[in-house]
Image: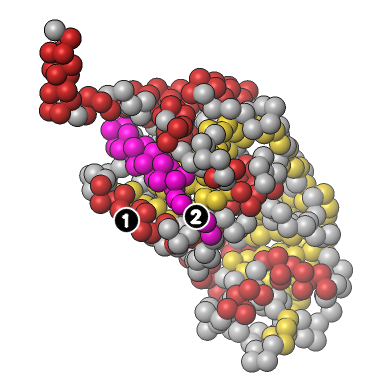
Amino acid sequence: MLKKTFFCCIIFLVFFPHFISAQSLITQQAIRDRIAFLASDQMKGRFPGTPESWVCAKFIRTNFKTAGLEPLGKHYFQYFQPTVKLDTEKNNTFQFEGFNGTLIRDYIPLSFSKRKTSLINKVIFCGYGLQFNFDSLSFDDYKGVNVTGKWVMILRGVPGGFGKDPTLRASATDYAKARIALRNGAAGILFVSNKGLADKKTESSPNYDDLQRLRPRKTVSLDVPVIQIKRTVADLLLQPQNKTIQQLDSLNEEQPFELIPTVNAVVDIQPRKVKTANVVGVIQGTDPELKDEYIVLGAHYDHLGMGGFFTGSLQPDTVAIHNGADDNASGSAAIMTVAAQLAKDHQLLKRSVIIVAFSTEEEGLLGSEYFIEHPPVPIEKIKVMINLDMVGHLDQQKELYIGGCGTFAQGIPLLDSLKKESALKVYVIAGGVGGSDHVSFYRKNIPVLGMHTGGHPEYHTPKDDLETLNIPGEEKVCDFVYEAIKKIANIPGKIEFIKQGDSD
Ligand SMILES: [Zn+2]
């Protein structure tokens, strides 16, 4: 009787092999439930430091604990206090005769401006604000003019005809130009986008002549006010002399000259620091030697909160909950779900796997940067970092993009072989390292894989909701990630970094 039952079981499993994997913890239900929690309206868009964001961090911690992940050190939380915003609500002004500017509409202080300062003085137009003498190229936009104590007005970007010159591009950043202005004695700087930059529509600046997003940067603040004004405002400043910024933009040889109006501006930038945490857990590998090496699987769990101007929202005039279901509740749910299965199968892993949910990605990869500056294991023991950011929009073609596959020798062959076994259409991209937290690891010469299922119209809008996601698709992505980690954790021998050309 017993024998017969056993035999029946074997027959059953031969004909219904998927029944074995029915035990898998990677299920649509598990993924959906986790996204539903993180991307619910109650979480108010998971802005770092908010009570709701802490609820999310604790939710992730509970998931890690339940799955059997261990903390690295005393806690699952890696606390840090980043500056998440530069607030400009108070006291900022930009005025000249007959004009009183509106913050954000007409002007914005730049992130490296002196935080609290003011200046009333004349303005000198200094072209592209360049001043250098290289072997093949020389510029002096300050020739024959004394800017000491005054404002300078400078075009952003590079002059026409030099767009591709790499030396010039490197010396023509706003920050580099501001330092040149200071060297010449300027007491304040007004930047105006050149036509090329004003025309350029990107994810973060979808409209003509957008002002830059004021976000915390690592660059040291300068000792003077630095303000970007719109081209329309520059035209008003130039009007008494019958000039326009368009004319000046197209004349590369224009000499510096003084404008007629006196500009009176006040800059008041308030840095906003918050307390937040990355959530970190580890699954120990089993190989006596390789278990001291680590594969990191990460995803950011923060999002844009209520949106608004300069938060990264692409509907900045709509203040509403940005649920960030795809960006990146999808990735957070994926790492929790894959982690549960990996922890269950830990005996199959030679190397150890660190699972980390990052905070403050949207403010400029701050959580992953903190993690890699304060790694919980020796940094040289981190062999590969796999990042999931937006994995919930698998489309009809089932496209999964993987950047960074060339950052270690085994990457491309390994992913190519997984791709053959997968139901997904996988794009194995050698370089293409950009856009999310894996960049912080790549900058430290660690091999990375950045995975996503592509952009969509809901991206960074209040419409990025659970209902728009493809949960069966994300289940397939999770299966793929699980298989990839199992393979990478078991690569025999050394995993070494290979630099790629096109990082950002
Ligand atoms: Zn994201």
Check residue 480 for magenta coloring. Answer: yes
- The residue at which mark 2 appears reads as 493
- The residue positioned 69% from the left and 88% from the top of the image is 134
The answer for how far apart the CA atoms under marks 2 and 1 are is 20 Å
Position of the C terminus, as image quadrant, is: bottom right
Q: Main secondary structure of the magenta part?
A: helix
Q: Is residue 173 magenta?
A: no
Magenta segment? 471-496
Q: Position of residue 451 (x, y in %)?
A: 42, 48
Element marked by disc 2: loop
Amino acid type of the residue that numbered disc 2 sits on in the rendered structure:
Gly
Rendered image quadrant of residue 4? top left
The spot of residue 453 in percent (x, y) is 36, 46
Q: What residue is rendered at 66% in x and 60% in y? A: 228
The three-letter code of the residue at mark 1 reads Asp
Residue nearest the observer in this picture, 203 or 419: 419
| Residue at mark 1 | 416
